[in-house]
Image (tube, rainbow, N blue to C red):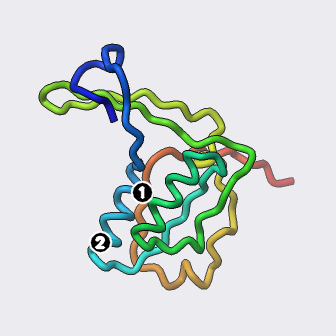
């Protein structure tokens, strides 16, 4: 988060905050005592560890939180004007959250789920079956 309102090019410093739409929704639902699972992929870097510790503070189950020691954490720098209109600059080339793997959530769990919230970045690679 920026130290003051203004365009990103005029911000002097930033404060580290855990966030991202999926994380924000998950944390808010946990505060409302909703039963939930959170499927995400976090880096093993210091920012990924910060996100993991934040999720644990809110007692988010980590059953489907996987760690990636070969990718960095996405970084987002936010600016906002005096009316709180936001602007973003993302650093997310091959980051952990873009490297999901299939079959992490078993079918037995999926069959019990009544609501799914999907958010943020998703890149689907087409596979050819031979």
Residue at the image point whose x is 69% and y is 43% from the top: 71
**Residue at the left extreme of this rendering:** 83
**Residue at the right extreme of this rendering:** 130
CA gap, disc 2 to disc 1?
Answer: 12 Å
Query: Which dot marks residue 23?
Result: 1
Q: Secondary structure at mark 1?
A: helix
**The quadrant where residue 26 appears:** bottom left
Q: Secondary structure at mark 2?
A: helix
Position of 9 relative to 98 (above/below): above
Q: Nearer the viewer, residue 43 or 92?
A: 43
**The quadrant where residue 54 appears:** bottom left
Query: Which dot marks residue 93?
Result: none
**The quadrant where residue 16 appears:** top left
Question: Picture coordinates of residue 102 (x, y %)?
Answer: 69, 62
Q: Nearer the viewer, residue 60 or 106?
A: 60
Position of 32 relative to 53 (above/below): below
Question: Which residue is label 2 attached to?
Answer: 31
Residue at the image point whose x is 56% and y is 71% from the top: 62
How dense is the environment of label 1, judged by Cα within 10 Å: few (below 14), some, or many (20 and up)? some
Position of 8 relative to 29 (above/below): above
Question: Picture coordinates of residue 110 (x, y %)?
Answer: 55, 78
Residue 31 horizontal side relative to residue 19, left or right: left
Q: How many marks?
A: 2
Q: Nearer the viewer, residue 52 or 100?
A: 52
Residues under numbered marks 2 and 1 in contact, where contact means CB atoms less than 8 Å apart: no
Residue 84 horizontal side relative to residue 117, left or right: left
């Amino acid at each position: 988060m920026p130290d003051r309102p203004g365009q990103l090019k005029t911000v002097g410093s930033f404060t580290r905050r855990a966030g991202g739409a999926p994380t924000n929704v998950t944390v808010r639902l946990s505060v409302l005592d909703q039963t939930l699972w959170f499927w995400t992929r976090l880096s093993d870097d210091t920012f990924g560890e910060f996100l993991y510790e934040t999720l644990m503070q809110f007692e988010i189950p980590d059953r489907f939180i996987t760690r990636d020691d070969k990718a960095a954490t996405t970084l987002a720098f936010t600016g906002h004007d005096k009316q709180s209109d936001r602007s973003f600059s993302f650093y997310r080339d091959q980051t952990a959250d873009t490297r999901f793997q299939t079959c992490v959530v078993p079918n037995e769990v999926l069959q019990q789920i009544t609501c799914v919230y999907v958010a943020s970045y998703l890149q689907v690679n087409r596979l050819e079956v031979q």
